[in-house]
Amino acid sequence: MTYCVGLNLRDGIVMLSDSRTNAGVDSIATFGKMHVWQKPGDRVLALCTAGNLSLSQSVVSLLNDSFTDSEGKQHDLMQATRMFEAAGIVGAAIREVARRDGEGLKQEGIEPNLTMLLGGQIKGRPTQLYMLYYAGNFIRATEDTPFLQIGEAKYGKPILDRVIQPETPLIEAAKCALISMDSTLRSNISVGLPLDLLILRKDEFKPALRRRIDADDPYFNDIRRRWGEGLRSVFATTPDPDWGL
């Protein structure tokens, strides 16, 4: 399983992903789930993936070059003129991979599943963030809901709901995303380190920060400790209910 979160804010985009694909007593695998395409001065696009690894790797392979779908239409992510078009190209790649491999997986008793987050900016257009599904359809983050999650989303959602607003500064949003990830790491063994963090500033068309965070990262370890201690402190100072027990 996995956990990825994307935030589309007025100053730009923050994306964070874990890297665990299998978890068990004797089966743990690590694969990066964040992929970035950029053309300096023109565009930067980032894709985070969750679900079947073979499907997601096949989709990324198609997107690395132009591809032709089953209807003979050619798609090239680096030629998209707006983010909506880029999301449509990713959706077409998902449908092509599903057409080719989906039924075979079902015959092997494997239910195909795949979700993706696509965030970025193309010159002359605003930053945008999309979540794509196995059918190739997608939804877009809005000012009312400026973040999207895939994978094990439930554990990390409460902090995002309470903190993230469109005007949240990028560095604070990155901190919030890391706390959201820490909550997920603590509650679900199928999500694991290392993490991949990406920050894109609006109109820069290149990553402002691209960082891999492992178990020895001092900042991540510090906020994990502070967040845990802070929660325990707030809990200890919250009055008990006066129910006469």
Image: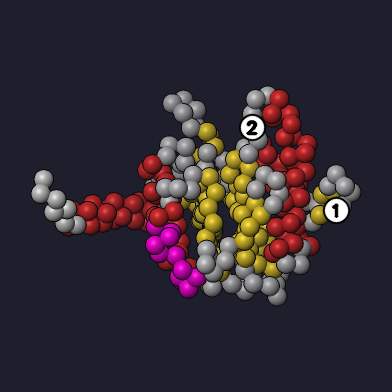
**Residue 16, image x, y percentages:** 51, 54
- Residue under pointer 2: 111
- Residue under pointer 1: 74
Pick whichever, 184 or 106, lies toward us.
106
> Mark on residue 170?
none
Task: Tell me what residue is drawn at x 85 percent, y 53 percent.
Answer: 74
Across the whole image, how many numbered discs are drawn on residues? 2
Mark 2, secondary structure of its residue: loop
Q: Residue farthest to the right?
A: 72
Q: In this view, does 94 lie to the left or right of 166?
A: right
Type of amino acid at the residue the image marks with label 1: Gln
Type of amino acid at the residue the image marks with label 2: Glu
Pick whichever, 77 or 237, lies toward us.
237
Mark 2 vs mark 1, CA separation in Å: 28 Å
Task: Tell me what residue is drawn at x 52 percent, y 39 percent.
Answer: 1
Image position of 170 with respect to 220: above or below: below
Q: Where are the magenta residues, as a range? A: 159-169
Closest to the camera, between mark 2 and mark 1, is 2
